[in-house]
Image: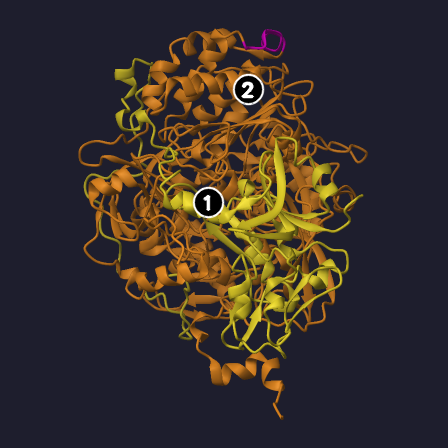
Amino acid sequence: MADLVKRMFLDPSRCIGCRSCVAACRECDTHKGESMIYIDYIERQNTVASSPTLCMHCEQPLAPCAQVCPAQAILVSPDGVVQSADETRCIYCENCGYACPFGVPKFNIAAHYMQKCNLCYDRTSQGKGPMCATVCPTQAIFYGTYEEWITAGRAQQGAKPVNTFAFGQQRVRTRNYVIMRQQDEELDLMAMIEEANLGWRANLPAATANRQTDTWVNAETAGIPQREVPAQPWTPRQPEPAPVPAHASTALGDGRVPHLSS
Amino acid sequence: MTVDKGIFRRRQRQAETFDFHSGEQAVTRWKSDEQIERYVPTHCCYCGVQCGMYLKVAGGKVVGVEPRADFPLNHGMLCPKGATAYQTVNHPDRLTYPLMRRNGKDSPLERASWDEVMDAIVGRFQTIQSEYGKDAVAIYSGSSMTNEKCYLMGKFARVALGTRHTDYNGRLCMSSATGANERSLGIDRAANPVSDMLHADCIFVIGANVGECFPIITSYLWQARDRGCKLIVADPRQTPIARTADIFLPLRSGTDSALLNGMLHVIIKEGLIDEDFIRERTVGWEETKALVEEYPPERVAQVCGLQPEAIIQAARMFGRANAALIYTARGLEHQSKGVDNGVTAVNLALATGNFGRPGAGYGTLTGQGNGQGGREMGQKASQLPGCREIEDEEDRAYICSVWGIDEKDLPHAGLPATLMIPAMLRQEIRACFMICSNPMVSLPDQHTVERALRGLDLFVVTDFFLSETAELADIVLPGSVWAEDEGTVTSLEGRVIKYNKAVEPPGEARVDWQIVCELARRLGKGQYFDFHSARDIFDELRICTRGAKSDYWGITYEKIDEQNGVFWPCPSADHPGTPRLYEQRFGFPDGKARFHPIVYIPPAEEPDEEYPLILTTGRVIYHYLSGNQTRRTPFLKEMAPYPWVEMHEQTAARLGIQDGDWVTVRTRRGEMTAPALVVRSIRPDTLFIPYHYGHTQAVNQLTNPVLEPMMKIPEYKVCAAVASRASQKPEWAKDIDVQDLLAAGKRRHELPMAHSQPNPTLR
């Protein structure tokens, strides 16, 4: 049976860490200026890899955040979208933050309530795509049905969407998918942390430190033809150029500070 | 129980009592209850991709952005610059009235009236020109503005001022690729539309950080790979697209032509050349073949700092593809041999017959919004509109007939932008009118540039923010941003698209072309600048390009709207435009492409004992060119507030530098201090510093001002440098608490600080 539910498909292998989604999420009219999506560099010292995190809209168990909410501030709409906290109900107990398997809820300290992704309900309920997926320059965040994802040709090279996450014995099935490999049935986050603690994968080959990098030689030694061209700077550096003339005031006449950036 | 639930409703009221975090609030005040009056279809003002977008207009102001799914290139996708571009329109830093130093260089910039500044400019220009000759006044223009404005600047220089010195910041951008295109292919445009990537079997990206500089193009790369296309990336850093590439060649900066010659060597040895194509459509093959014979991969690998097997594999992968694309950008072009580098890339594409078919070709990814159109519109030192040569008798006569001037009044070729600086120091150029450019960030060897600009008798800058360069000006004219005017722009694939006007300029600011036309009128040349709209200018521009290489004659505003952009050349009203070039013939009279044998030239500065490292520069995704706009956009500034020094952990360990330490980088031109980003994603012999920042944060204090002999592009991408741990913070950072920043970055998971983290542990 065709799955007609529109979902997010998160593909970290495509993510370039540009945070376009973060910038666009802030443009949403319901929470303008606040972003509900996160982009993390995974291990910046090793790689430029990055990954998006946003509300996965848990299906089974249904919305742990809503289930633990003592004030019933987090509502789930009939179409399975877990809404942001109702700001008139939220008592700022942060229970949802502890219950969420993915660390998504965001606490607005100034106004004392929780905010999270509501799948751009104002847009998606009107048939438009959510902001983050619409703007994502690499389509690392894809919005659509499973069939649409397949039709877009995304599965051709062995990618497979997974929406089951294992936390020890606990399984969580979510509305949104992450893209894994053909052989993966679920994403076992605890096991990955264990692996990392045991030191596996710690010594991934460094991207650019191959054997040759320290031992480059010039063209003459290597024996390839080269052409010596005398360097032509645009102005002679000898004799030493005169110092820059005295600094004129750069303040504006009306006392405004002209420059934000430095 | 009586609880006033109202207190939860309005954050503004809360802020009075619970405002713990006001220091972290963005500058912009957000409002979400606005009624949007109009959605103006337009394009992004930043890079050459020119994504479509809607601007939301309410109460006569631009208040937001809405993705525009109906533009066929980006389908609604936007990068963070695009998503925040609208914030420059109402920015509090906008210049809203003219500024002028009334009492010499040491007086402050004061508010002045338009009449006062216009009279001052015209009076000084006329005095200087009568005393020192017409050529003592120069125009320094830009490419991040519409074709209409670019065209107008060239005409203003030659007709209103009568000076031969007019050039533009495209000189610093893709002029090397222009040289390569002109020498090898005959037409200065990317050969293929971007959508051709979806037909390629192999894409070779060399010296182009596609993920950060042209983010939307990445989606085409990924879609191509979904179809099984192979990706080869050559770059001294692991760029976001290099991370998952089929072959990543982390080459030494400045050795591109050796690598490309080496790959061609392998392709010939393995019999992967397309002999029919070479015979029928090219000339000069034998000399090139004989030369690359001397570039075996084993030797090339030593020079490039690569493994020979990787070069052989890459050459095989490229040579065996049915249709292959090569994309280059500034990494390969910002060198003292940038044209040569481009030519070697074209050689590779020609030898394998990769032209004129879907998914086969060579193209440069032009960086500036109108980098393509800006170089065709006759604001270049050596060209007239339509890529016509200024020294060609026929072209001169034709343009003079359109402009209605005498041929002997049309000046000849002038100095390119980079040579204007020494000419200013020699006092050959005594006054300069600058628009849409910020050389106090963008030119190399900043100290020399500053001396040159400060020494001018009259320096006029038109801009909408007070850029680092405008700070040095004697007169600053408040111009318009892209949303305040209409006009056409030519994107990196050669597609002419159109900006639409959303709002009026703020305060006394004026639309740029009106400022220029008014100046021309006061200079007594009003009859040549009788334009009443951008459309008038475009119509004259079309006539000027009629029959030229870049032919806009058949393009109209209506046609652009109907077709979502028109690819030039478009020679007649019923012509649909030309998305793919070279299907039948190349741009030379005989229709054949040219091979040029290219001997490897080493970088002008090689590392030595005193300066043992290579310094390279580049862009980050959050900033555009000199950062004059993006450094003022709160979100973008927060993401990349200041430059950093990216270095390999081996280098850092040798120098005793840790992630986040202040590092001083020195070259023969100067020094600067910035925090270290210690990573394994860069070559150990290379340092990288982003170039978007000004004053003491400018990496261009350090870069080497040697010029490419043909196009005069500076060598930004390679110079010798030395790094050391700084004993103290630089002056610009005295207010920055790095620990605070690190903590904030951790809290937000946002700042790109690396940290030498231990392995993750569960709490």
Label 2: element kind: helix
Q: Are marks 1 and 2 on the same chain?
A: no
Q: Position of residue B428 (x, y in %)?
A: 36, 44
Farthest residue, direction front: A169
Cβ–Cβ below 8 Å for labels 1 and 2? no
Which quarter of the figure is the C terminus of chain B placed in?
bottom left
From the viewer's perspective, is the residue at label 1 or at label 2 nearer? 1
Q: Chain B hue?
A: orange
Residue under the image location 35 percent in, 29 percent down: B252
Distance between the alpha carbons at the discs numbered 1 and 2: 44 Å
Farthest residue, direction bottom: B2
Residue under the image location 67 percent in, 73 percent down: B33
Q: Position of residue B640 (x, y in %)?
A: 43, 55
Residue under the image location 49 percent in, 12 percent down: B267
Q: Is residue B278 magenta?
A: yes
- Main SS category, magenta section: helix
Residue topped by disc 2: B349
The span shown in magenta is B272-280
Residue A192 circle label: 1
Chain containing the residue with disc 2? B
Q: Which chain is yellow?
A: A
Dot 1 amino acid type = Met
Q: Position of residue B548 (x, y in %)?
A: 66, 30
| Towards the viewer: B187 or A235 | B187
